[in-house]
Amino acid sequence: MQPVERSNPDGVDYGWVMQMTFVTTILVGSPIVAVLSINAGLQTWGARAEFAVRVGAVIWFVTAVALFVYAKRTNAGDGGTPPEAELDTDIDAED
């Protein structure tokens, strides 16, 4: 049986950033869009959808950039492993 290969990439965990962007945007961004829509004159469903997409896109972008910067500074999303931790490489392959 061949050993399972592992990797310990340096840098930002982009999967974590994408997942957290999705969750944070829904939890924080949805109420922001709802509050901002109170004063907007949105008479049709098309206008409401367009407003939500335009404002939501800005919120999504700001959230993604903020989480990327956070992950880059704190090594977030790496499962709590220090960057200098080495992987166990003493796995013997059995033929």
Image (cartoon, helix red, strand yellow):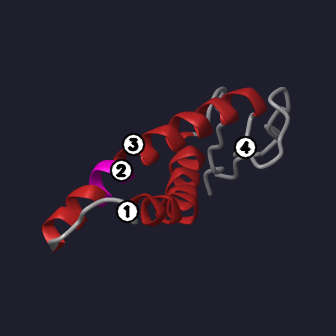
Residue at the spot x=52%, y=65% of the render?
31
Callout 3 secondary element:
helix
Mark 1 crowd level (few <14, some 14–19, many ≥20, 10 Å Cα): some
**Quadrant assignment for the N terminus:** bottom right
Specify which label sits upstream in the sequence, 4 or 3.
3
Q: Is residue 29 above or below residue 69?
A: below
Based on the displayed image, in which of its 4 quarters is residue 66 positioned?
A: top right
Q: Identify residue for label 3.
A: 58
Callout 2 secondary element:
helix
Report the front residue among 18 and 25.
25
Residue at the spot x=69%, y=34% of the render?
70
Q: Is residue 28 above or below residue 76?
A: below
Q: Amino acid at mark 2?
A: Val
Tags 2 and 3 in contact by the CB under 8 Å rule? yes
Q: CA distance from mark 4 to mark 2?
A: 31 Å
> Which mark is drawn over residue 37?
1
Callout 4 secondary element:
loop
Q: CA distance from mark 4 to mark 3?
A: 27 Å
Q: CA distance from mark 3 to mark 1?
A: 14 Å
Specify which label sits upstream in the sequence, 1 or 4.
1
Q: Which residues are magenta?
A: 52-56
